[in-house]
């Protein structure tokens, strides 16, 4: 299972306690993981990626294993530690607004 | 026992303020949907327990919420607002073409008769409709597709469709207003639209009497007389007696004719309310005195209403969706401020009390009159 840590406002919106765990069939990419998260929690559609363009929302960031994955193509395989469930994918709201 | 429920949208959540028909003791519930900007909360006239809310965030975008128990609990509904076809461009602030981009829902207008039908006015300006309680949204693209669309431009707050008035006597007729395109009307249920800005004069655009380009802030009507419209424009308070085909200025003796909200007394179709604001850049009440102005003559003759409102050192604003009336006798009038106060008058505006004083900045106020 892939572990995903969401920011608190999105956990409240989707009524999630703690991390989300999703199963992904096929390559474990950012796109596949987010598709699985949105399928399991439809309330999150549009909050991480734009509903129409499917692009990352400007103030959302994706971190894992001390790497910033935000600017990678969404079809890049995620790090091994995320794929084997030993590390979570962190979905982070950027520090902005003062 | 009758009662009222004030639905308050703020920068950091929604609040529900409720009282019995005396409107003296208030119960405050909230924040609901805490931390999010709640641009508008409005209940269905056909089912007061059904309430829709627009919830948004600079980080997480647009979410739509629905309550089926009068605002006690909420559940997310559909938030996909896709423009119909190729969106095209409108004017940007510098006059260059700019692609239409969805940003947020400013205003929700539930159907007068069907709790599952609701309209949404959005930025960049367009009108959407849901017929399944907010689960899915379809654009009424005849409005954006009106030939003037490429000439529309944003006001300072964005190019928002902020006013939706449903004609209670004619289900095919809807009025809307956009900053800064102006007012529009459909007579065929939203298929085709026409600008209704004749008589408006705006010195801040190249042609002051242009067909579109006017910064309309708010329009109001009395349900018994839907062809009479009242408008608070960027400057000027206006009136139309022919469903918007022509407008006349009724600013009269107002201390300033700039402001945002305008509303009509529930039982007196010629009694209207505005909150004059110093502008162009200050956006607070003249002389630090928060005054609602009331006209009992359908405009031109205005009286200040000050009892219970701060008359010194007050520099808040009242935004366009932040005033509402109930339908009790006597009519209650309510408004919220950017300073977090919600004021209520149970006597048609003669006197006011703060229901709450320290909410986040208030974006919208709606009132439900409960049987």
Image (cartoon, rainbow, N blue to C red):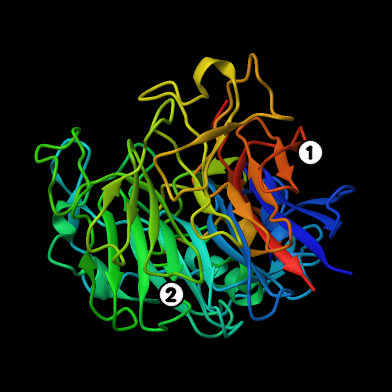
Q: Residues within 10 Å of mark 2 (few under 14, many from 20)?
A: many
**Is B131 drawn above or below residue B53 in the view shown?**
below
**Given this view, does label 2 or label 1 mark the residue nearer the observer?**
2
Which residue is at a point 18% across and 60% down the rendered structure image?
Answer: B149
In this figure, which residue is indicated by the disc labeled 2? B167
Q: Report if residue B96 is visible in the image.
A: yes
Q: Secondary structure at mark 1?
A: strand
- Left/right placement of residue B362 relative to residue B187 reads right
Q: Earlier in the sequence, mark 2 or mark 1?
A: 2
CA gap between label 2 and label 1 equals 33 Å
Above-or-below relation of A24 to A58 = below
| Badge 1 density bin: few <14, some 14–19, many ≥20, Cα 10 Å | some
Secondary structure type for disc 2: loop
Q: Quadrant of residue B308?
A: top right
State which quarter of the image contains the N terminus of chain B: bottom right
Rendering quarter of residue B162: bottom left
**Of residues B162 and A98, the one drawn nearer to the viewer in this rendering:** B162
Residue B337 percent coordinates (x, y): 62, 36
- At horizontal 36% and vertical 44% (from top left) the residue drawn is B158
Q: Which residue is mark 1?
A: B356
Percent across and percent down for residue B269 are 51, 60
- Chain under numbered label 2: B
Q: Position of residue B8 (x, y in %)?
A: 68, 51
Q: Are marks 2 and 1 on the same chain?
A: yes
Question: Would residue A7 be seen by someone viewing this image from the given angle?
Answer: no
């Amino acid at each position: 299972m892939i572990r995903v840590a969401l920011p608190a406002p999105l956990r409240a919106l989707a009524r999630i306690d703690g991390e989300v765990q999703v199963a992904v069939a096929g390559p474990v990419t950012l796109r596949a993981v987010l598709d699985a998260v949105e399928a399991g929690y439809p309330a999150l559609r549009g909050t991480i990626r734009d509903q129409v363009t499917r692009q990352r929302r400007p103030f959302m960031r994706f971190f894992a294993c001390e790497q910033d994955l935000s600017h990678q193509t969404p079809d890049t395989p995620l790090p091994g530690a995320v794929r084997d469930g030993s590390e979570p994918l962190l979905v982070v709201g950027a520090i902005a607004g003062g | 026992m009758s009662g009222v429920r004030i639905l308050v949208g703020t920068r950091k959540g929604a609040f529900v303020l409720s009282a019995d028909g005396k409107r003296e003791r208030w119960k405050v519930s909230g924040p609901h949907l805490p931390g999010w900007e709640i641009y508008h909360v409005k209940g269905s006239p056909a089912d007061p327990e059904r309430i829709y809310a627009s919830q948004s965030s600079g980080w997480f975008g647009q979410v739509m919420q629905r309550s089926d128990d009068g605002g006690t609990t909420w559940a997310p509904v559909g938030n996909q607002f896709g423009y119909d076809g190729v969106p095209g461009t409108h004017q940007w602030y510098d006059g260059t073409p700019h692609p239409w981009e969805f940003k947020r829902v400013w205003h929700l207008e539930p159907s007068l008769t069907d709790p599952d039908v609701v309209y949404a006015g959005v930025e960049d300006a367009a009108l959407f409709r849901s017929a399944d309680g907010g689960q899915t949204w379809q654009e009424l693209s005849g409005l954006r597709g009106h030939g003037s669309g490429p000439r529309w431009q944003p006001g300072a707050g964005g190019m928002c469709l902020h006013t939706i008035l449903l004609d209670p006597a004619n289900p095919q007729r809807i009025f809307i207003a956009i900053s800064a395109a102006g007012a529009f009307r459909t007579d065929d249920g939203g298929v085709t639209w026409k600008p209704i800005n004749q008589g408006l004069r705006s010195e801040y655009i190249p042609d002051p009497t242009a067909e579109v380009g006017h910064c309309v802030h708010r329009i109001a009507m009395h349900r018994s007389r839907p062809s009479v419209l009242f408008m608070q424009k960027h400057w000027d308070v206006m009136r139309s007696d022919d469903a918007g085909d022509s407008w006349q200025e009724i600013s009269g003796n107002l201390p300033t004719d700039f402001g945002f909200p305008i509303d009509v007394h529930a039982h007196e179709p010629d009694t209207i309310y505005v909150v004059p604001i110093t502008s162009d850049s200050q956006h607070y009440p003249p002389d630090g005195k928060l005054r609602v102005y009331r006209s009992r003559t359908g405009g031109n003759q205005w009286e200040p209403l000050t009892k219970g409102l701060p008359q010194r050192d007050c520099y808040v604003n009242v935004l366009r969706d932040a005033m509402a009336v109930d339908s009790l006798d006597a009519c209650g009038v309510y408004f919220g401020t950017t300073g977090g106060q919600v004021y209520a008058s149970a006597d048609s505006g003669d006197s006011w009390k703060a229901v709450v004083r320290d909410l986040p900045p208030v974006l919208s106020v709606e009132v439900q009159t409960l049987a």
